[in-house]
Structures are given as structure tokens and as C-alpha cells.
Image: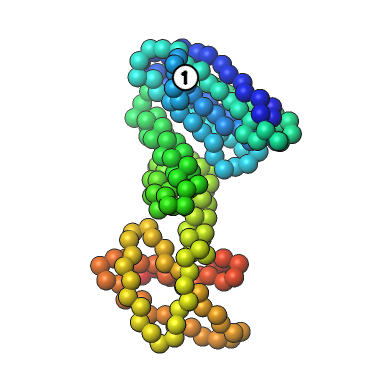
Amino acid sequence: LARTRITTNFALRPNEFFQVRVEQMGIDVVVKLFDVNHNALATMDSPNGNQGPETLTFVSEKSGRFTLEITGLDGKAGKGNYSIRREALRRATPKDQQRIDAERVFVQGMAAREILEQQQTAIAKLETALLGWRQLHDRYMAEITAKQIRAIQEAQFNRDARPLPLNETIDRQIKGGEIHGYSVELKAGAVMQLDVQEKGIDAGLAVLGGTGEGATVNY
């Protein structure tokens, strides 16, 4: 499977649970579900490269026929393999809907991440998805989602960081989830003290080195 598109058709009854798990083995795939009119109903493509699982969950609102499509994401990639497992059909539960909601908002967050003006939207959606994964005890997707949130925040920090002058008070407005970055140059053995006065919002403070690693302080 490279850019090959593989489809399979099946029928569902009202409120019937459908879930597939596609295990990628050397190929990055995207999994999509369509209705009979080829309207996209669900998509899953997590940032796990060409190894690891892609899980897509769906609950039908009414009877109908559906198409599952698996596509190799990179047309220039070599061939790889995948395995697919379909869970047994059954009536949906509230927990199933919670899984669907987490998958949907995760995909929306990943799409927003690609648009510079929607970085805060991406963080908000991914944080919602992260909460869902944790409630579902899905450690794999929780780790992936947390990593994506950190990557967006670090990119924002590196892009927007401004010099921090000595002995000068800076007053700025900040929203929940927003990051303000400041660049400081220190010599070996130097001591730095920062005083952040919170005014109507709970803020965290992180000190990062040139590698992006560092300590975080949150009062």
C-alpha cells in the first residue's frame, strides 16, 4: 500500500456501534468513513508516522450502507503493510459516544494546527480531546495528544518571543491557553529572578533552555 485506496462496504442499523483498528506497519494511512452519498462521516489520522494504530469509531443514527476507506497518505512513500480489525457490532453506549467525541475533536484540532491563525483553537480542541482520552483511559492517544499540544506551544513561544529588558515592568493582557514568550541571554553561573504579578488570571511560568528543555513553576 502506497497511495493505493482500499474500500469496503457494509450496513449498519440505527444506534449500532462500529469500530475498526488499523495497525500501520511501515506505511502511514488515513482512515475515512463515508455514507452512501460519499459524504465523509468520520476520519482518523494520528501523527504516529508509519507505525502504530489508527482507531475510527462511529455510531449510526439510522439504517444505511457505509464505505470504509484506507489510503496511503504519502504517494512518494514505498510500500508497507497494515492489518485491520473490526469490533463486533452491538448497540452503542454513552462511553462509545464519548470516544467518538474525542476522536472528532482530536481530528479538528490537528487540522487547525496546520493554520497559523488557528493555533489557539488547535490547543483548545486538543486539550478537550486529551481530557476525553484520559477519561477513557486511552494512554496511547493521551500521550500523542499531549505531545502535539506541547509542540504547538513551543512553536508559538519560539515564534513570538520578545527580548526581556532588565529592571523594567511590562504590563500585557493574556488569555487562557495563550503563551507569551521572552528571550533572555545568560552567561554560565548567572542568576535570574523573575517576578510575575497575576491580575485576574492564573498563570504558569516556564524557563526553557536552548534545547526547549527546562523547569516549570506554577503557583
Residue 128 visible? The answer is yes
Residue at 53%, 46% in the rendered image: 144
Nearest to the observer: residue 164 or residue 215: 164
Name the outermost residue toward the right: 78
Nearest to the observer: residue 103 or residue 98: 103
Residue 20: x and y in percent read: 53, 25
198 relative position to 159: left or right: left
Residue 127 visible? The answer is no
84 relative position to 134: left or right: right
Nearest to the observer: residue 143 or residue 107: 107
Residue 74: x and y in percent read: 65, 35
Residue at 42%, 67% in the rendered image: 180
Q: Give the amino acid at mark 1.
A: His
Q: Splitting the image into 4 quarters, where does residue 185 fall?
A: bottom right
SS of the residue under disc 1:
loop
77 relative position to 67: left or right: right
Number of other residues with Cα within 10 Å of mark 1, as a class: few under 14, some 14 to 19, many 20 or more: few
Nearest to the observer: residue 89 or residue 175: 175
Q: Is residue 68 above or below residue 97?
A: above
Q: Quadrant of the N terminus?
A: top right
Q: Which residue is mark 1?
A: 38
Residue 39: x and y in percent read: 44, 22
Residue at 33%, 71% in the rendered image: 172
Residue at 54%, 36% in the rendered image: 45
How many numbered callouts?
1
